[in-house]
Image (tube, rainbow, N blue to C red):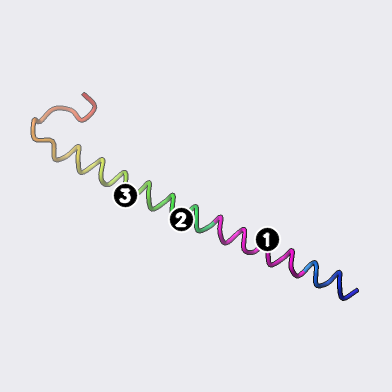
Amino acid sequence: MAEQQDRLAREREEIAQRVANFKATQKKFEREREEYFVTTLENARNRSDGGAYWQ
């Protein structure tokens, strides 16, 4: 019985760690998207030739 409880506890810990890693990865992607957006928007606003950004 104790072995089964230990195994279940280890599995729960592993799942919790995987969830934490996933959340951290998602936060990283969110920060990178935000940085990309800000940089792209700034570049579009600061074009010296006055042309459209996508041309």
User: In the image, which residues are magenta?
Assistant: 9-22
Q: Position of residue 22 (x, y in %)?
A: 56, 55
Badge 1 crowding class, 10 Å Cα cut-off, few under 14, some 14 to 19, many 20 or more, is few
Residue located 76% across and 70% down the image: 9
Q: Is residue 24 left or right of residue 53?
A: right
Q: Residues within 10 Å of mark 3 (few under 14, many from 20)?
A: few
| Cα–Cα span, label 2 and label 3 | 12 Å
Report x, y in % for residue 3: 86, 72
Using the numbered discs, state the Cα–Cα distance from disc 1 to disc 3 in whole angstroms: 30 Å
Residue with the most extreme right position: 1
The amino acid marked with disc number 2 is Lys
CB within 8 Å, label 2 to label 3? no
Residue nearest the observer in this picture, 51 or 1: 1
Residue 4, numbered circle: none
Q: Residue at x 53, y 57 (%)?
A: 23
Give residue 2's quadrant in the image. bottom right
Q: Residue furthest left?
A: 49
C-alpha distance separating marks 2 and 1: 18 Å
Location of mark 2 (residue) = 27
Q: Is residue 17 above or below residue 1?
A: above
Residue at point 62%, 58% (across, down): 18
Residue to which mark 3 is pinned: 35
Q: Earlier in the sequence, mark 2 or mark 1?
A: 1
Which comes sooner in the sequence, label 1 or label 3?
Answer: 1
- Residue 15's disc is 1
- Mark 2 lies on a secondary structure that is helix
Q: How many marks?
A: 3
Label 1 SS: helix
Give, as a three-letter code, the residue at label 1.
Answer: Ile
